[in-house]
Image (cartoon, grey):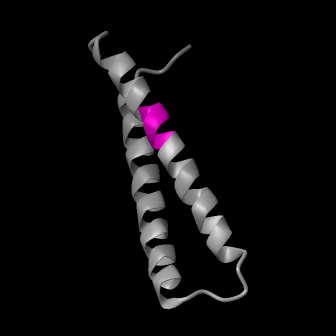
Amino acid sequence: MDEVQVPALSEELDRLHAEHTRYAQRLQELLDKPYLSEDEQLEEVRLKKLKLHAKDLIFAIERQMPAVA
């Protein structure tokens, strides 16, 4: 793998981890509520999809990065 790509992938990985964490935190806030409005229910579904997409991208990038011994 190109040495220039590794730092770029690492930065993208860090960004995706932060994004995934933000989605998880907001999702937990919604799940802690006893009742969700219609908008909150839609947000919950959207957040679950975004969180899963971020996780998929994280795994894809991790597969591209060279193994560190």
The image shows residue 62 at horizontal and vertical percentages of 44, 34
Is residue 4 depicted above or below 47 in this figure?
Answer: above
Tell whether 8 sits left or right of 10: left
Q: Give 31 or 55, whichever is nearer the viewer.
A: 31
Q: Which residues are magenta?
A: 13-17
The image shows residue 61 at horizontal and vertical percentages of 38, 36
Q: Is residue 39 magenta?
A: no
Tell whether 27 sits left or right of 60: right
Please name the predominant secondary structure of the magenta segment in the image.
helix
The image shows residue 64 at horizontal and vertical percentages of 35, 30
Is residue 57 depicted above or below 42 in this figure?
Answer: above
Is residue 45 depicted above or below 22 in this figure?
Answer: below
Is residue 58 depicted above or below 29 in this figure?
Answer: above
Q: Give 54 or 69, whichever is nearer the viewer.
A: 54
Quadrant assignment for the C terminus: top right
* Residue at left offset 46%, top offset 83%: 39
* Residue at left offset 28%, top offset 12%: 4
* Residue at left offset 41%, top offset 21%: 66
Q: Is residue 16 magenta?
A: yes
Locate residue 11: give its quadrant: top left
Q: Give 39 or 56, whichever is nearer the viewer.
A: 39
